[in-house]
Amino acid sequence: MIFEDPKQYVESGFTPEIIIIGSGPAGMTVARQLAKAGIPCALLDAGEEYFSDTSQEVYKGEVIGDHYYRLDEARLRQLGGTSGHWTGWCRLLDAHDFQKRDWIPNSGWPIGRDAIEPYIAATRETLGLPDFRDDQPVTEAMNWIDLIRSDPVRFGEKYRDELAESDKIAVVLNTYATDLEAQGAQVTAANVVSPEGSAYQLQASHFVVATGGIENSRLLLWSNEKSADPVVPDATALGRYWMEHPEFVCGEAIIGQPATYTPDEDGWAYFAPSLKAMETAGIANFHALIFPNLYGGTKKLVADLACTAPSAAHWFANLMGHNLICGAHLSMAMEQVPLYENHVALSSSQRDFSGVPRVELHWRKGEIEGKTLVEGLKLMGATLIEKEIGRVRMDSWVSNGPDYPTEGEIAGYHHMGGTRMSDNPRLGVVDANCRVHGMQNLFIAGSSIFTTGGHANPTTTIVAFSHRLGDHLASIVT
Ligand SMILES: Cc1cc2nc3c(=O)[nH]c(=O)nc-3n(C[C@H](O)[C@H](O)[C@H](O)COP(=O)(O)OP(=O)(O)OC[C@H]3O[C@@H](n4cnc5c(N)ncnc54)[C@H](O)[C@@H]3O)c2cc1C
């Protein structure tokens, strides 16, 4: 069923067991998993079926700290959420991302990756992915890794007909959940408004917040201000430890015929460090992408590199005219250390049409990210030399600082943390089952639950956790 607004839904008399707020990859996956188990749920979305400026306007907010994208351009408020314009790069978090690493502050999930592995097949089906390939060591320090460039699933388009035909899922569009109400350890209602401002109160026995990696914090922060009893009883970590994947084109390389890895059909290849290499260098996780420079300049790069690294001249001379493949660019995407200071807050002066405070995002890259960029590039360079594959040159802004660029790609549009998972309610918002600490019937889906963010684009892991949450909810409501 698809209802165009909350009025239509209320008049239908549909009674859900579970209300899921947000129909992006996270919320829609939970709903589909519940429907498979025969459990009726309402899938609310603030947006319409397609993009609209009016809906997007609510996503405006302010960023305080490092240069970042406009918040109303960094996500989509419509059926299927931000999958309406994601790129489709897919990879699960690494098993070692879940571990406590002594050199990464606040690292360590309460569960291992094995908790989501039973859901890999379902995740691949939802995202239309081939099998994941195991990482292959190139050296002790670096692996050639798989980062699938999929045909991106637009959840609103791909699953629209299934949702329309379902008698278990009631999709309710144009339904903005402004806040939740709690009594003791129970959420009792979601307060929603239509775009025209008509207000309704919706009830169910369980609630799932799946409004994206910024809005999850915003909705819960505002709920805590409005509700007589708190919705997140210990709010110490609420909105906190927010993370992105800083991401930059940061160097160039000359690449010979690689014997140790196979670039894809476009000449792209991804590499990531071993846990040992990260520990030795005291850095966070990252991936480096080598992709061909299609715009020339290779001869100049060879000349420059030969001047700055005379020992490489012999190697270049051997390659020239033989098996020199190309000049390449190097980009890096890095894990960001979860820091308390990086957080989602409510604006004290700006509100949207419904009176909910706009988002204020406090975000800065830290020391370890800078070190990861420099040391990661060095590791990549050393790997290419050790295997006689090529030579790397860092861009000067990296070696000089780093003095981060403010133009072009600067981060992945990956919004993580804010309601992180921890066994300790002071250090996290949800427990190992994605249930809000201290609440019996409130759960969270999406990358806001990530304790640490690894280097992998988040949606594959989001979908895996959402299948797991759907399964868990099915087991407790039946
Ligand atoms: C340009 C771009 C490229 C990207 N490329 C990749 C990629 O290649 N790989 C990858 O893994 N990730 C990528 N991402 C990130 C990816 O889109 C997100 O990780 C993913 O969409 C998050 O899913 P979600 O369901 O948690 O949130 P969203 O997709 O943001 O969905 C949230 C939903 O909640 C609704 N909503 C919000 N607030 C409310 C409210 N108060 N009440 C009711 N409904 C509400 C919204 O309308 C939306 O439908 C990209 C993002 C962008 C912007």
Image: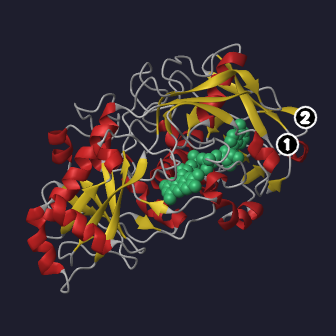
What's the amino acid at mark 2?
Answer: Ser
In screen coordinates, is 42 left or right of 366?
right
Task: Please give the name of the residue rendered at 31% of the width and 73% of the height, measured from the top-left corner.
Answer: 298
Locate residue 78, reporting x and y percent. Answer: 73, 51
- Disc 2 and disc 1 in contact, CB within 8 angstroms: yes
Query: For mark 2, does the 10 Å Cα neighbourhood hold few (<14), some (14 to 19), or many (20 or more) residues?
Result: few
Q: Is mark 2 within 8 Å of ligand 1?
A: no
Can the viewer see residue 150 in this picture?
A: yes
Locate residue 305, reporting x and y percent. Answer: 21, 63
Q: Residue furthest top?
A: 228
Locate residue 2, reporting x and y percent. Answer: 80, 56
* Element under disc 2: loop
What's the amino acid at mark 1?
Answer: Pro
Q: Nearer the viewer, residue 285 or 122?
A: 285
Q: Nearer the viewer, residue 94 or 403?
A: 403
Instruction: Check the picture and name the quadrant holding the N terminus.
Output: bottom right
List the residue tagged with mark 1: 6
Kindly report the distance in space between the C-alpha atoms of the residues bearing marks 2 and 1: 9 Å
Instruction: Check the picture and name the quadrant holding the C terminus.
Output: top right
In the image, is residue 121 above or below residue 200?
below
Picture quadrant where residue 147 is located: bottom left
Locate residue 115, reporting x and y percent. Answer: 37, 46
Task: Please give the name of the residue rendered at 85% of the width and 42% of the height, measured from the top-left corner.
Answer: 6
List the residue tagged with mark 2: 198
Colour convention: secondary structure
* Element under disc 1: helix
Q: Residue furthest bottom?
A: 321
Q: Earlier in the sequence, mark 2 or mark 1?
A: 1
Task: Please give the name of the residue rendered at 67% of the width and 64% of the height, measured from the top-left corner.
Answer: 159
Q: Select label 2 or label 1 by which is in front.
A: 2
In screen coordinates, is 277 left or right of 192?
left
